[in-house]
Amino acid sequence: MPKTKTSTGPALPSKAEILAFMASEAALIAEGKGSVVKSRKREVARAFNIKGSDRVELKRMLRELEDEGQIERRRSAKRAGGAMPTMVVADIVTRDTDGDLVAQPIEWDVAENGPAPRILVHVPKLHRPGHPVPGVGERALLRLEPTPDAGPDDPAFTGRVVKMIARDRARLLGMVRVGRDDSLRVQAVDKKNASEVYFLPIEDAQGAQDGELVSIEPIGRQRVQGLQAVRVTERLGSLSGEKAVSTIAILTHGIPHVFRPDTLAEAAAVQAPGLEGREDWRDLPLITIDPPDAKDHDDAVHAAADTAPDNVGGTVVTVAIADVASLVAPRSAMDREAVERGNSVYFPDRVVPMLPERVSTDLGSLRPLEDRPALAVRLVLSADGHKRRHTFHRVMIRSAAKLSYAQAQAAIDGATDDTTAPLLEPVLKPLWDAYRLATRARQERSPLDLDLPERKLVLKPDGTVDRVVVPERLDAHRLIEEFMILANVAAAETLEEKRQVLVYRVHDEPSLTKLNALSEFLQTMGIKLAKGQVLRPAQFNGILGRVKDTEHEHLVNEVVLRSQAQAEYAVENYGHFGLNLRRYAHFTSPIRRYADLVVHRALIRALGFGRDGLPDMTAKELGEVAARISAAERRAMAAERETTDRLIAGFLSEKIGAVFDARLSGVTRAGLFVRLVDTGADGFVPAAHLGDEFFSFDEPGRAMVGTRTGTTFRLGDTVEVRLVEAAPVAGALRFEIVGGGQRGRRGPRDGGAPRRPSGAAAGEPLPWRRKSRRTR
């Protein structure tokens, strides 16, 4: 095919040339010269020097190649077609019933592509000296081949070990159980392997008792009573302790939670910086507004009417952020441990901080009426709310007050207290005036406006759940959120202007696959979304507006959320789709996020604020940091979610047989995922327990349809469920449907006879197996 001539630059490449470029990248992977193929549109454009409006034509060509099946989209990236590359980095996660090792790729988008494929690891029967010998919990570079004659339940690929990749060996954790015959078992606590049970020889138990959390490792291929035999490598304590549930998540995910001695020693020796090299802003009445139980205070805010004659009706918003860079030196012990942790992790019963308390809750926290170093930005907003200009300053501040969100909101609503009464006129009202201006610009920008309530667990003194509440969303929350977004944008703009390398917070647009799936689903509700069109957040908001205050509101919000990509950190800027911003960087939380600390150091260097700025780093080096902290963020999110699941499962374990109102939060061939209305608890209803007929999976309609009666269970439907089983250690709940669904709608196999999965006798309930990963 000839090249396409454009009016703005060189000729566009042909489709054949694009495919050849992608194939060359795949070849580098196969040769071990790369680890991930990332031929995004911008990288293809860079390779062929495509600029300006020609990128629109390039995007169209790539979309056509997708539609033709010649390339596929993976994690917002395009690569040559084929379900798996020739070489893949994978974690060895378990052994199968035959004792063979099974691995899964570490880079896999479950939401977009379904469950990660299982890879049978080929281990030579004869060990050659120097040849790597893999084991469970290790990571390896594998060369893949399709497994010949693989059945539907067999691994689709076989992987030969090219090399082992050094990393901390993943821990297998479990809870010791004593059987009736006094034999020992270990029940896995990792949700991915929640159904696994191991045999524990008494001589390998190290004295572990019933109900104790232990770290284990397999004993070769030894099997006893059909179970893999294991030995205890470490006793981790009883699960009856106050913080046992979060301990499981911390250890399962390998979250660093004990600071090293050199880190603590360094933190203890930190001295608070003085005024030298700083502007004195201690007379400016900045205030902090945080949750009532917050121990660290990253940000303080202030606003005042702009008196400049060229900005009538405008305002000046000041955002001051704790100057953590002045307390944590690059490449110091604290810094090395902070990048390893990536971020603070917030559990219902504790916080695992990124930095030692000496910094996070003392010297680095903007405590009221105490001098604290800060990096501040002054944002000048016009009368229509748009930012006209901004300036950064390295300052010393003294916060005038520490308020909670509810306290600040109550004062604005007319209920002041001793703290807020003197602040109402000079501080709080100007802040709310500035917020109203900023809201005008936000509405014009039209970021993605999802309405999904967030639940909070209230715990008893013993660490168990007392109740589940949905905190009210206040204007005070929105005010702080909007000012932080403005500060983050200003940071990214300044660093770009100074040509300083930085870590962006990026959020890619939804993939074509997800958009097509969303379009098909919305069609079932009479809402049209043209396939293949380029969407902006405003179009999504239009869809959400159409269903607001209807029975479908919650459902559509959930489905739109699932269609979105996952935000991450990167040195390459491709914008923030959800916020509808061209450039965005996290700047406002350096106490709890390492990305913000990097941005602070970059600003200090770019603006000549001192010698403690970002050291010399290439874009590649900073990109590696971005990848590490992105992975740490995903790790924290998984750990926090699993801890909440375990706590709620424990809370509900005393209510077996109770009936709850629920909403269908997921529909798969295996069954229905439900979310309880009152607590937000997630559970599963196996397909085999939906009724006395066979239910067919309607993928476009996100529904299970009874083939005989037409009874339909559709994503978002309200149902009544009975709790059948609770497994608190795994955070798993199993339910059965007792009411709800749509009756009388005929299914696609109208009149078809009910049938059951192979291996199940008529009327025999199937053993429950909870899906280990699901889209949220």
Image (tube, rainbow, N blue to C red):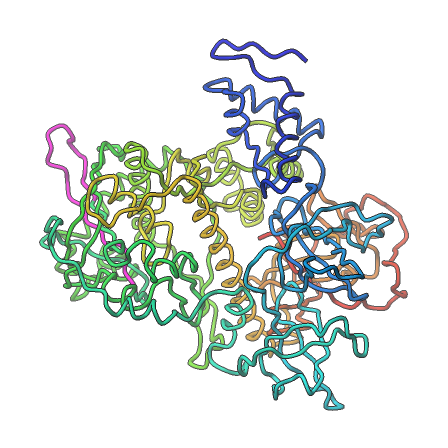
| Quadrant location of the N terminus in the rendered image | top right
For image coordinates 25% across by 59% down, the residue present is: 327
Whole-percent x and y of residue 522? 62, 38
For image coordinates 36% across by 36% down, the residue present is: 443
Q: Nearer the viewer, residue 726 or 200?
A: 200
Q: Nearer the viewer, residue 351 or 444?
A: 351
Please tell me in which quadrant of the rendered image residue 44 appears. top right
Q: Is residue 758 above or below residue 87?
A: below
| In the image, residue 299 lies in the stretch drawn in magenta | yes
Whole-percent x and y of residue 454? 46, 58
Q: Residue furthest front?
A: 129
For image coordinates 32% across by 70% down, the residue present is: 264
Q: Is residue 225 above or below residue 256?
A: below
* Left or right: 373 in relation to 521: left
* Left or right: 709 in relation to 217: right
Whole-percent x and y of residue 407? 26, 62
Whole-percent x and y of residue 284? 12, 52
Q: How many marks?
A: 0
Please tell me in which quadrant of the rendered image residue 731 appears. bottom right
| In the image, residue 483 lies in the stretch drawn in magenta | no
Residues rendered magenta in the picture: 296-317
